[in-house]
Image (cartoon, rainbow, N blue to C red):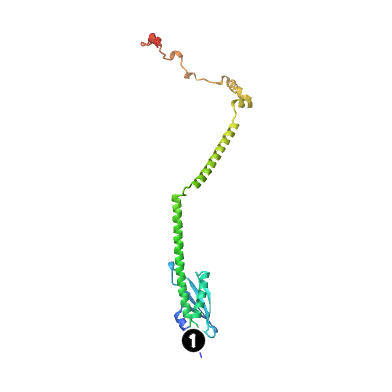
Amino acid sequence: MTDYSEEQRNELEALESIYPDSFTVLSEKPTTFTITVTSEAGENDENVQTTLKFTYREKYPDETPLYEIVSQENLEDNDVTGIINLLEQQAEENLGMVMIFTLVSAVQEKLNEIVDQIKTRREEEKKQKEREAEEEEKQRFHGTPVTIENFLNWKAKFDAELLEIKRKKMKEEEQAGKNKLSGKQLFEMDHNLDTSDIQFLEEAGNSVEVDESLFQEMDDLELEDEEDDPDYNPVNLDSD
């Protein structure tokens, strides 16, 4: 007859020595304990972690233990589902043997794979961003390739904009021409304009002062008579 209690007790002692920092007994009846499993450090010391909770059934190891994930770090939902499926598979394959170490080791390998997948995914994302940045730089350097279709579209848009500018300018010039008055219109609007100069002179009267020093007597001007010129010859003038 199999002594299940003895087998369970011996396994607990072995697990406690193998996982001294991550093994915790929660209860003795039923025997329940947790083991925290952490992956190897990945890039930038990143890792993933999960805490597994096990409960012995009465006839364990001839019955599979109960198991669940009570906490996790940096795992996606599909990762958690994958770990549960892995535990189920390993438990069925090792039925009849103490199996907690085997289950924990399988989860440890799974976490290491997840870290590698995270590293690969991030490298792909980095390469994708680099490719997108390179493509964007090429587009900026080369511009958009000119085709007949996009040239005609640009030409139609350019002509429409130019036509609109001309229309606005013509409208502004037309409006300015309407607002500008002719001399006749100014006199018709203000009859004082035709007498303004006369009125100014009458109002000035004798108050207008002239600086006589600005003028000289005609006698003081040194004007030469053509006849006093020794080179003067009236015959030459006639010949011209």
Amino acid found under the numbered disc labelled 1: Glu
| Percent position of residue 239, x then y | 39, 10
Residue 42 visible in the displayed image? yes
Q: Circle 1 — which element?
A: helix
Q: Quadrant of the C terminus?
A: top left
Q: Looking at the picture, how far across and down is residue 98, in whole percent? A: 48, 83
Q: Is residue 224 left or right of residue 66?
A: left
Residue extending furthest bottom? 1
Question: In front: 36, or 119?
Answer: 119
Q: Residue 90: x, y in percent?
A: 49, 78
Residue at coordinates 43% horizontally, 14% vertically from top-left?
220
**Residue bearing mark 1:** 7
Of residues 77 and 74, the one drawn nearer to the viewer in this rendering: 77
| Image point (47%, 81%), residue name | 15
Q: Name the spot of residue 139 as percent of width and height, x first.
A: 45, 52
- Is residue 46 visible in the rendered structure shown here? no
